[in-house]
Every structure is written in C-alpha cells, then in structure tokens.
Amino acid sequence: MRLLFVPKLKFHLKGCHFGKVENIEKAVTEQLKAIPVGDYQRCYEEWEQRLRRCVASQGNYYEGDKLDL
C-alpha cells in the first residue's frame, strides 16, 4: 500500500485544468476526503514499520522486509 494516495490522486485529477490554485486545492481536498480512514491508518502503520527498519539498520541499505526487528 506504499504511496497509496499518489496514484489515486493522479487518476482523478489527470487531464483536468483548474485555472486557479484554489480550484486545485479544492479538488485535491475532495479526493483526499474520499479515501477511507482505514487506508490512511494502514498507510501510516506501514510507514512506521519502514521507519523502524531504517532505524534498526542504522540507515544501511536492506532489501524489502528482510530485516528482522
């Protein structure tokens, strides 16, 4: 579910011309509000797990989920 929101935003906003920054802000806000809360929660939990792996590896490179915590 990494970067879940970027493809959803791009899909709904692609090809649109908004004219003003305010219109872009409104359209993006509407699309973000349409994403279920559970998706936000899972995205945050996955981000937190990746952060823990990064800290545990002391910033060294590792592949995917191969670092045991």
Image (cartoon, grey):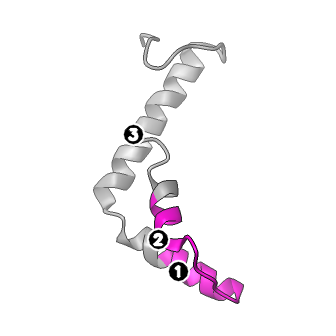
Q: Quadrant of residue 57?
A: top right
Q: In the rendered structure, which disc, 2 or 3, sits on the residue that comes first in sequence?
A: 2
Query: Which residue is depicted at the point 43% across and 18% down?
Result: 65
Please tell me which residue lies in front, 15 or 40: 15
Give the label on residue 15, or none.
none
Are the residues flagged by discs 1 and 2 in contact, CB closer than 8 Å?
yes
- Separation of residues labelled 1 and 3 (CA atoms): 26 Å
- Separation of residues labelled 1 and 2 (CA atoms): 9 Å
Numbered disc 1: secondary structure: helix
Could you say where residue 1 lies in the image, as x and y percent from the top left?
A: 39, 42
Are the residues flagged by discs 1 and 3 in contact, CB closer than 8 Å?
no
**Residue located beneath label 2 in the image:** 12
Query: Which residue is depicted at the point 50% across and 76% down?
Result: 29
Q: What is the three-letter code of the residue carrying label 1?
A: Ala
User: Magenta region: which residues?
Assistant: 8-29
**Residue located beneath label 1 in the image:** 27
Numbered disc 3: secondary structure: helix
